[in-house]
Amino acid sequence: MKIGFVSLGCPKNLVDTEVMMGQLNARGHELTSSPEDADAIVVNTCSFIGPAKQESVDTILEMAEFKKTGRAKRLIVAGCLVERYGSDIRQEIPDVDAVLGTNELDAIVALCEGGEKQANPFEPYLYHDLTPRILATPRHYAYIKINEGCDHPCTFCVIPQFRGSFRSRRFESVIVEAQRLFAQGVREINLIGQDTTAYGDDLGIKDGLALLLGRLAEIETPHQKWVRFLYCYPNRITNKLLDTIAEHESLVKYIDMPLQHAAPGVLKNMKRGASGEIFLKTLEKIRKRIPGVSIRTSMIVGFPGETEKDFEELCQFVEEARFDRLGVFTYSDEETSKSYHLDGKVDARSIYNRKRKLMSLQRKISRKLNRGLVGQELPVLIEGRSEESELLWQARLANQAPDIDGVCYLSDVGDVEPRPGQFRMMRVTQAHDYDLVGDLIDEPPNEPAPVLNPFPIISTNAGHQHQHQ
């Protein structure tokens, strides 16, 4: 049987898709990236905010057409949308044959084969190193989910409602998976979870993330490697964690720390706590302990009760903080979130204007920081030919996370064509708001580049950023 997958949402969702693909492949089924050739199609959905829900519904309807025009006999909807609207999906979209929640991934084989999932009570799911998995990313980088669920009470977030309470993978399970991925030619591993900085708390491991990163850095590989982690919580940034990152060359000097706001009143209503003043001290500590570190954050504008004064305080904070990367997201009023019941809703036009203003402010900061890199020689990871032009190649600096941050465009790659997955040296020649342009200045390495995956996936927007940890 040929099975096609569509994966929507964040990298955490993409890992779920890879696990489902792995289970089907282990059962002997063939994966296809052509929906017209698929006997069954699985849409792994996101429903965190309004636009994500709409994208999920539109994609389901689009894939349903292949039951009429293609070979598809089964359409299965999986993921977060099922957790929120599972009972409505099959009623509203009769072409859907089955639904699969985020904690039911083991049932994917039965559903694709036309069977039924077992009526098990809610049991939190978490894959491990023995779980079959097929990467949908290019072969040179991969994600590892180190924990699942969340215990934070953020009022704008609905993730705990369908991902369950926080739980960590076993320490050795993560190490074994990383060793296998590096042995397969992966050059960059990105650790993900709802809150990676809480890793190991539930297992009784003190400084769990720092210990895990230190162990990953010690894995011997025949090639250079990068290890980064995403989605860290600001009050969990310990000196031990920062010193570990600073100590090991292979640990990327990159902190992804969504702060969400800077005005104390807004943060209090978000159930986040702290303030811009406290955050500035945290940023000072990070930059002091990790020389040359890049810091990424995200902010929400238009949260209920956000006044013009609150927003101005946020803008002043961003100007003072000088983030290397910043995403701005408009508040989405989700009916099952606690913030849905708060007074002081901000009108859509004000939210739109606030987002534009904050992004404009950050664009100037980013442009200035990028211009400071012109003339520097920096290591990059080759991604492949650019989709922008056949004449350009694309690469990333260590402080450019895949599918989230800007990229580097290579205008001169020398006489020998580079290969995806190679680490090379680039001289920066031009700076744009978010992207850089440069030339390769070193000789190509003798080591073989990793083989590209066949991309057994119909489509994905795994870098799609949402307003969450």
Image (tube, grey):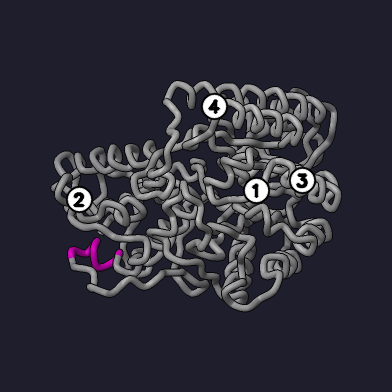
Comparing 165 with 210, the one in front is 165
Q: Position of residue 73 (x, y in %)?
A: 17, 52
Q: Which residue is at the front of the view, 4 or 450?
A: 4
Residue 114 falls left or right of residue 465: left
Residue displayed at 71% across by 36% down: 324
Q: CA distance from mark 4 to mark 1?
A: 19 Å
Numbered badge on residue 257: 1
Give 386 or 233, whichever is nearer the viewer.
233
Q: Secondary structure at mark 4?
A: helix
- Front disc: 3 or 2: 3
Q: What SS does tag 1 mark? A: loop
User: Could you tell me residue 37's position as x and y percent?
Assistant: 26, 46
Q: Nearer the viewer, residue 16 or 31?
A: 16
Can residue 419 be seen from the camera position used here? Answer: no
Residue at the image position 33 percent from the left and 58 percent from the top: 30
113 in the magenta segment: yes
Task: State the residue position of label 3.
Answer: 283
Amino acid on which disc 2 is placed: Asp
* Contact flag, marks 2 and 4 (Cβ < 8 Å): no
Task: Please report the bounds of the magenta region as a residue range.
Answer: 108-114
- Asked if residue 277 lies left or right of residue 58, the reply is right
Element type at mark 2: helix
Q: Which mark is residue 429?
A: none
The local secondary structure at tag 3 comes to helix
Q: Residue at x 81, y 30 (%)?
A: 373
Q: Earlier in the sequence, mark 3 or mark 1?
A: 1
Res 172 quadrant in image = bottom right
Q: Which residue is mark 2?
A: 88
Q: Earlier in the sequence, mark 3 or mark 2?
A: 2
Going from N to C along the chain, the mark reached first, 4 or 1, is 1
Q: CA distance from mark 2 to mark 1?
A: 35 Å
